[in-house]
Amino acid sequence: MSIVKVELESYGSDIEIKSEETPNIPPKRQKLMSSGKKNSGAARYKSKFNLEWKNKYPLISEVDNDKHSFHCIVCKRNISCSHMGLSDVERHLCTMRHSKNVQIQSTFSLPTLSNPLTEKVKRAEMKIATILVQHDIPLAFADEITPIFQDIFPDSQIAKSLSSRRTNPTQTITEYIVPSLLHNLLQRLRSSPFSLAIDGSSNVDKMSHFTFRLFDVNRGSVCTQFVDMSSGLDDKGIFAKMDEAMTDNNIPWTNCVGLGMDNHSINRGCRDATMSHVHSKNPATYVIRCSSHLVHNIAEKAADAFEEISKFSVDDLVIDLFYWFDKITNQKPDSVEFLSFCDLEFEKCIKDVKKRWLSLEYAVGRVLAQFSALKSYFLANGTNYKYTIVDIIYRILYLILQTKRV
């Protein structure tokens, strides 16, 4: 068996033709003696991307490290052209998704820079959009920037020509800033080791973030970078979304050295779990459990042991204080006086919620910050009230039950 390899330069295709080199057998007979399939003698090839296609369709470009795919600039995704070559490109350009993206881009298209003033205006608009992103300022704030600048700088031609309402910064961020930053990030992820961090949730409306942790040469430290996000994912769909993002962005799984996730069995189980799927892609990936969960569980067990020995519940204290000052309105003025006497500012007591992480730490911290005033308050007024804190809580619960019955 020999393989004849022919390269078609015009279509950028590699063709492999299999033939039997058997002496004294005609070529037609050799085809019949092959695998027996109807098209066994036909050529099998994969089309390669041709740079000349860019001249005909400017909205496409080549893909690094993948000669059998092309990148759609409008849709921002890589698409295979290995099957039909240029016909694959033309078929994508006729899809409804591409046509819709072209329409959206034409709506937000920026005018060309025709004079120095326009260039300065666009430079100012780019800086405004960057500041909004850098400081996490809502884009609605951009609606107030243009009138303010025009009022402050009435003699400036740049301020008069400025157009920084929310539509302009939105288009600038999504079409220019994000693609540029994402391109640089993907280049580093394709060539450097990184770790992944995911979070599963029973809330299908929650947006799940797909983040990477890698060493940033410019910062000189390990940092977290955002790549993608999705909503409505259950535990089984998390890995599918991860693998889709890795494949679409040409990020190799071999660069993934670590994975951080929750501790429940759907993530760390031996069968059909996220950890097993990741190990099928890269067995060398080290999976670490959520350290915050471990610290929280240790603190919870220690608090239970302290309560059993001392017969004192920190949770009950925090909850009692919350209901005492929150449900009885006439207690707040008296407590404010004691806080002023102790040179402390009034801060509302926080209720501890078991299902919220580390809420007890914030609640206890708030109590400790006002402990001297709270102690003086209860020692001075403890005998003036008819009911204790527990009695008041029971009365509130009794009223709630009576209301539900009615």
Image (cartoon, rainbow, N blue to C red):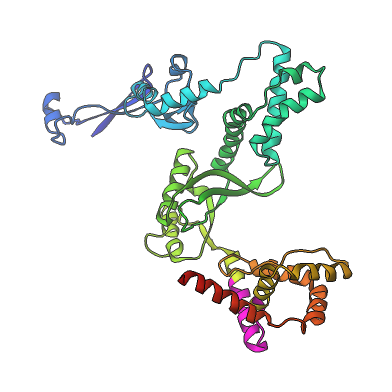
Along the line of sight, the residue nearer the viewer: 372 or 46: 372
Along the line of sight, the residue nearer the viewer: 228 or 374: 374
Depicted 396 relative to depicted 99: above or below: below
Question: Residue 183 at what x, y percent from top left?
Answer: 57, 34
Q: In this view, does 134 lie to the left or right of 288?
A: right
Q: In which quarter of the image is residue 357?
A: bottom right
Question: Residue 63 at what x, y percent from top left?
Answer: 48, 30
Residue shown at the point (59%, 74%) measured from the top left:
396
| Residue at the extreme front | 406
Q: In which quarter of the image is residue 270?
A: bottom left
Residue shown at the point (44%, 51%) measured from the top left:
233
From the image, which quarter does the N terminus lie in?
top left
Asked if residue 323 shows in the view, the reply is yes
Magenta stretch bounds: 297-315
Asked if residue 26 shows in the view, the reply is no
Residue shown at the point (73%, 81%) measured from the top left:
385
